Image (tube, rainbow, N blue to C red):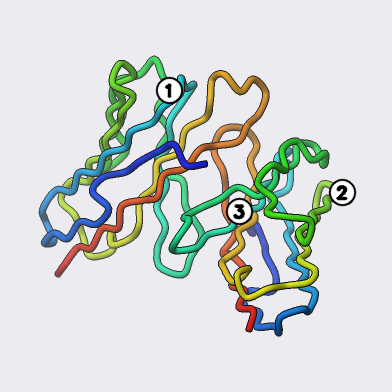
């Protein structure tokens, strides 16, 4: 089992640029989560999908953030335009039930 | 919002000693989970304890749950340098219905010195 696969692992981008983070969940998992982790705020849930449908996006910071899950094996998190305060580690995770399986994260730096 | 609160925030011990971390939460729950995060890596699930369980063991891990006090503890016995990591508790929310969002604490950073 390959686990949750995220790309890119690291990205450095300039303020104002569009950032797209990608995720392939574990096959058979029906829930997918996008989290953001910073030293100041800890782990924050941005959005989660159940059976490809967004269920709770109350954690999405603002309209600059959007997430899609066009099929059961792929999801994207897009930030447009990016700002320095978006610098963080973004985790994708999937779950078949109670236990959540995390990817290794996408480390985003916006300069 | 974070409802889980772990304490201590940081813990430093010698190899071979036991490490105890605590977690408090606010809502009614179905279950509580503990996760570990090594530096620069994703979180890894350690153990889940259901609301009708009081204690659970997994290898060197022992988790207790006191629903009357809305608290849990994670004990790592005979610690090793490889146990150095951050440890997080996460709870669901019984009142949230089908919403499967977990509520996370800010974590305890454990350093095990060789």
Give the residue number, with chain letter if any, for mark 1: B50
Q: Position of residue A38 (x, y in %)?
A: 50, 63
Q: Is residue A54 left or right of residue B1?
A: right
The C terminus of chain B, quarter of image: bottom left
Q: Is A44 or B36 nearer to us in this picture? A: A44
Q: Position of residue A105 (x, y in %)?
A: 59, 65
Q: Disc 3 vs disc 1: which is toward the camera?
A: 3
Q: Chain of mark 1?
A: B
- Mark 3 vs 2: CB contact within 8 A: no
Give the residue number, with chain letter if any, for mark 3: A35
Q: Is A58 or A78 nearer to us in this picture? A: A58
The residue sitting at 70% across, 46% down in the picture is A47
Element type at mark 3: strand
Inter-mark Cα distance, 1 to 2: 32 Å
Element type at mark 2: strand
Inter-mark Cα distance, 3 to 2: 19 Å
Q: Position of residue A104 (x, y in %)?
A: 56, 64
Q: Chain of mark 3?
A: A
Q: Which mark is residue A71?
A: 2
Q: Is A46 or A71 nearer to us in this picture? A: A46
Element type at mark 1: strand
Rate crowding at label 1 as few (under 14), some (14 to 19) or many (20 or more) other CA atoms within 10 Å: some
The residue sitting at 65% across, 37% down in the picture is A96
Q: Chain of mark 2?
A: A
- Count the labels in the image: 3
Rate crowding at label 3 as few (under 14), some (14 to 19) or many (20 or more) other CA atoms within 10 Å: many
Inter-mark Cα distance, 3 to 1: 24 Å
């Amino acid at each position: 089992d390959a686990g949750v696969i995220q790309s890119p692992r690291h990205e450095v981008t300039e303020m104002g640029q569009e950032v797209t983070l990608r995720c392939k969940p574990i096959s058979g998992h029906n829930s997918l989560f996008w989290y953001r982790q910073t030293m100041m705020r800890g782990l924050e849930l941005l959005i989660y999908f159940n059976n490809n449908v967004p269920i709770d996006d109350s954690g999405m910071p603002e309209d600059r953030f959007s997430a899609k899950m066009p099929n059961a094996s792929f999801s994207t998190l897009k930030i447009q335009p990016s700002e320095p305060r978006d610098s963080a580690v973004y985790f994708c995770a999937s779950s078949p039930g109670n236990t959540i399986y995390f990817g290794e994260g996408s480390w985003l730096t916006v300069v | 919002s974070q409802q889980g609160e772990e304490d201590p925030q940081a813990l430093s011990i010698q190899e071979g000693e036991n490490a105890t971390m605590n977690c408090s939460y606010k809502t009614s729950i179905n279950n509580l989970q503990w996760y570990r995060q090594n530096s620069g890596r994703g979180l890894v699930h350690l153990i889940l304890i259901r609301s009708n369980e009081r204690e659970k063991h997994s290898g060197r891990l022992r988790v207790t749950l006191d629903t009357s006090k809305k608290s849990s503890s994670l004990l790592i016995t005979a610690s090793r340098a490889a146990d150095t990591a951050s440890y997080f508790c996460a709870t669901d929310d019984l009142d949230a219905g089908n919403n499967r969002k977990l509520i996370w604490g800010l974590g305890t950073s454990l350093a095990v010195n060789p």
